[in-house]
Amino acid sequence: MSSIRLTPTSYLVLGLIRLGEATPYQLKQQLAMGLGDLWSVPHAQVYREPERLAGAGLLSETVEEAGRRRRVFRLTAAGEKALAEWLTDPTTEFTELRDAGLLKLFLGADPQALAEGQLALHQAQLARFEEMRASGGDAPSGPMLALEAGIGHEREWVRFWKRLSREG
Amino acid sequence: MSSIRLTPTSYLVLGLIRLGEATPYQLKQQLAMGLGDLWSVPHAQVYREPERLAGAGLLSETVEEAGRRRRVFRLTAAGEKALAEWLTDPTTEFTELRDAGLLKLFLGADPQALAEGQLALHQAQLARFEEMRASGGDAPSGPMLALEAGIGHEREWVRFWKRLSREG
DNA sequence: AAGTAGACCGTCTGAATAGGACGGTCGCAT
DNA sequence: ATGCGACCGTCCTATTCAGACGGTCTACTT
């Protein structure tokens, strides 16, 4: 029950486990097909983090009896509380635009050449997102709202790079 | 001259030093007043990274004779080359939208409550950026283009959260 | 029944980063 | 001459990254 620093990754794990008990592998799967596009976590991390959280008492851990002896994690009351607090906490942090293309632009790369490549990338990503939206449910769930945000930003990138590639 | 992995931070340092020789402290200053908004680097890193790059032969290092004995770094030919290659390389990487507010939304935070806080944050950031644009030069330099991108994305955030706060 | 391909699942390690505590050095105004 | 605040830099611990590596299960073949 030592106290540890809770990072966004921690809450990510807590949040996914709140949807139901899960093994690290299942978490990894979920990330791969959804949130991972917005907020990637290296898979090794997905095995480590639940351990850490269990050590802090925010998750409980049981081991399957069967052959594979997978470790299954569940939210504890403390974990539920920690997550709820974070979710309602009016956060102060905000985004950084940590984009490699943007950094290159800043540092003096040729705008037009750069724009072409970046434009293609973002158009592809936008298409993927829109496909996800089409195949996703229609209820305004958290994930769907987040996807909307993703789409908005990809559109913005497309606008931005398109303008640069024309102007160059 | 051991070979090391070059990260975006590496190129960031190379790029800033290309504008002229610099001490780590000067790099820190530059970051604080510009690029740091888009791509933050902890200050300790700004002292370590030039060292690493010098070890790899991409920077040269000289020490002031004067009292403070500051370390001054310059680009070597190898550094110049590495930077130029990266800048022209049509990158494959692209952005993640690593935003804490967005993560909360995904994980089920109350959209309307969240939106209010986030809206205020992004409006403030947008205002700062626009002020920077106003006081900045008018030539379309790399930094100015990057600032444009930042403004575009902040506007997008404002649109997004505003819509959520109305709908809620 | 034994073999084996391929998916499934997990651990480990070294390098790099984050974040902040801490400690020296300088000029200038008492 | 001394003491204060700004200037400048290092160090330490916890965490993260990236990816190599290694087991285990199922299903299908022979």
Image (cartoon, coloured by chain):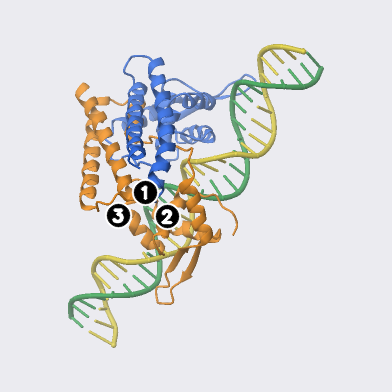
Chain colours: A orange, B blue, C yellow, D green
Identity of the residue drawn at 35% across and 54% down: A31
Does residue B52 appear to the left or right of D26 in the view shown?
Answer: right
Contact between labelled residues 1 and 2, with CB atoms less than 8 Å apart: yes
Does residue B88 appear to the left or right of B41 in the view shown?
Answer: left
The numbered mark 3 sits on a residue in which chain? Answer: A
Looking at the rendering, which quadrant does residue B18 occupy? top left
Identity of the residue drawn at 52% across and 24% down: B23
Q: Please state the horizontal and vertical placement of residue B69, each as a whole percent of the image.
A: 61, 23
The CA distance from mark 3 to mark 2 is 16 Å
Q: Nearer the viewer, residue B143 or B130?
A: B130
Q: Which image quarter is the N terminus of chain B in?
A: top left
Looking at the rendering, which quadrant does residue B3 occupy? top left
Q: Which residue is mark 3?
A: A33
* Amino acid tagged 2: Gly
Q: Please state the horizontal and vertical placement of residue C28, each as a whole percent of the image.
A: 68, 12
The numbered mark 1 sits on a residue in which chain? Answer: B
What mark, if any, has residue A59 been given in the picture? none
Relative vertical location of residue A37 with respect to residue C12 in this rendering, above or below: above
Between disc 3 and disc 2, whose residue precedes? Answer: 2
Q: Which image quarter is the C terminus of chain B in?
A: top left
Q: Secondary structure at mark 1?
A: helix
Q: Which residue is mark 2?
A: A15
Q: Nearer the viewer, residue A115 or B157?
A: B157
Q: Please state the horizontal and vertical placement of residue A89, each as a whole percent of the image.
A: 49, 44
